[in-house]
Image: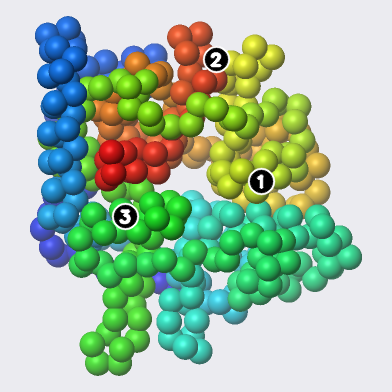
Amino acid sequence: MQNQYENNGEQLQQGLEQPQEPPLNQRGMIAHPNLLSTLSPDQIRRDQRIGLHAIREFLQSKTSFDVLPVSYRVIVFETSLLVKRALNILLQNSIVSAPLWNSKTSRFAGLLTSNDFINVIQYYSQNPTQFQFIDNLTLDGLRDVEKAVGTPSLETVSIHPFKPLYDACVKMIQSSARRIPLIDEDENTHREIVVSVLTQYRILKFVSMNCKETKILLQPLHELNMGTTTNISAAKLETPVMEVINLMIQKSISSVPIVDEQDKLINAYEAVDVLTLIKGGLYADLTLSVGEALLKRSEDFEGVYTCTLNDSVFAISETIRKARVHRLFIVDDDGKLLGVLTLSDILRYILFS
């Protein structure tokens, strides 16, 4: 089910060609001008507060609809669709999530994400006698799978497209969702309409392109208590894929960093990589090591991005504006893994710090 929806509202910068920018350094971060040497620590902290306040006002002044491209399509799955068919459609369209639609109730039925496929893997690994029925599993059967493995149910949080963008951000953080469907309602039939799905990445890119106050967010990460730098789960190239999948389930994470013997970051294995691995029902590939599985990774993988504790929110914002970033791994000057900074961490800091 596809829904074509045009954004005829205020046209802000969604992906327009930008003026020439400062070059990227070796980590992919913007090598911004040497502003820090001319500002006192008190000035930097004061500007940081001013910048955050301005960004919050910006988010309150815009709607979720403002973030959408001028023209786009959204793929929606009927809940009676086979899970294996839904997986193939996701991969064919290079997307990792899709809203679900219940035609019996004519209502939004939740959001299908890569986590749901990981739950399916966990269920059949725990119940091998049921594996013979996997080809007949439909999307509306995912709730039974979730109950059996004790994981949270399908994401059902949503928001009206014309509600303030700030409200959408708050809902995402409160529900630990990385994306939120925009649901409208037909005035005559009162049927729900799936308008689109808004992601944290698109929101933060929208802010970086349209809110100039990001340029004064110059405090380094080590002063801001952002990201996770303790109890970081990591794997080696020889780690079995199923062990990494179990880490994702246990820690409720969507990416596991891959390090060498010196704990230097060399790659990351992500939930979306699992989808590629089980494409076509080839669950036997789950016996591979991470190194072997990475050889099957999709060619359009965005890459692994890093930052250091000395980088600022402005530098990270510029990276998000220029590249499709979902998280940044925090490393030291030698490339040793120190932690991870997610888009949720950045959004939470902007909203509540």
Task: Kindly state the secondary structure of the residue where label 2 is placed.
Answer: loop
The amino acid type of the residue labelled 1 equals: Gln
Q: Is residue 101 left or right of residue 320?
A: right
Task: Kindly state the secondary structure of the residue where label 1 is placed.
Answer: helix
Q: Is residue 162 left or right of residue 104?
A: left
The amino acid type of the residue labelled 2 equals: Lys
- Disc 1 designates what residue? 250
The residue depicted at 66 percent of the width and 46 percent of the height is 250
Task: Kindly state the secondary structure of the residue where label 3 is placed.
Answer: helix
The residue depicted at 37 percent of the width and 67 percent of the height is 158
In the picture, residue 257 is in which quadrant?
top right
> Which quarter of the rendered picture does the C terminus lie within?
top left
Q: Residues within 10 Å of mark 3 (few under 14, many from 20)?
A: some
Q: Residues within 10 Å of mark 2 (few under 14, many from 20)?
A: some
Q: Residues within 10 Å of mark 1 (few under 14, many from 20)?
A: few
The residue lying furthest to the right in this view is 129
Q: Could you tell me if the residues under marks 1 and 2 are in contact, i.e. CB atoms within 8 Å?
A: no
Whichever of labels 1 and 2 marks the residue nearer the N terminus, that label is 1
Of the numbered discs in the image, which one, if any, rests on residue 186? none
Q: Between residues 130 and 92, which one lies in front from this camera angle?
A: 130
Of the numbered discs in the image, which one, if any, rests on residue 336? 2
Q: Between residues 92 and 31, which one lies in front from this camera angle?
A: 31
Q: Is residue 280 visible?
A: no
- Disc 3 designates what residue? 170
The residue depicted at 34 percent of the width and 43 percent of the height is 348
Q: Is residue 140 left or right of residue 59?
A: right
Where residue 178 sits: x, y (%)?
43, 51
In space, the residues marked 3 and 1 are separated at their CA atoms by 25 Å
Q: Is residue 314 above or below residue 332?
A: below
Q: How many marks?
A: 3
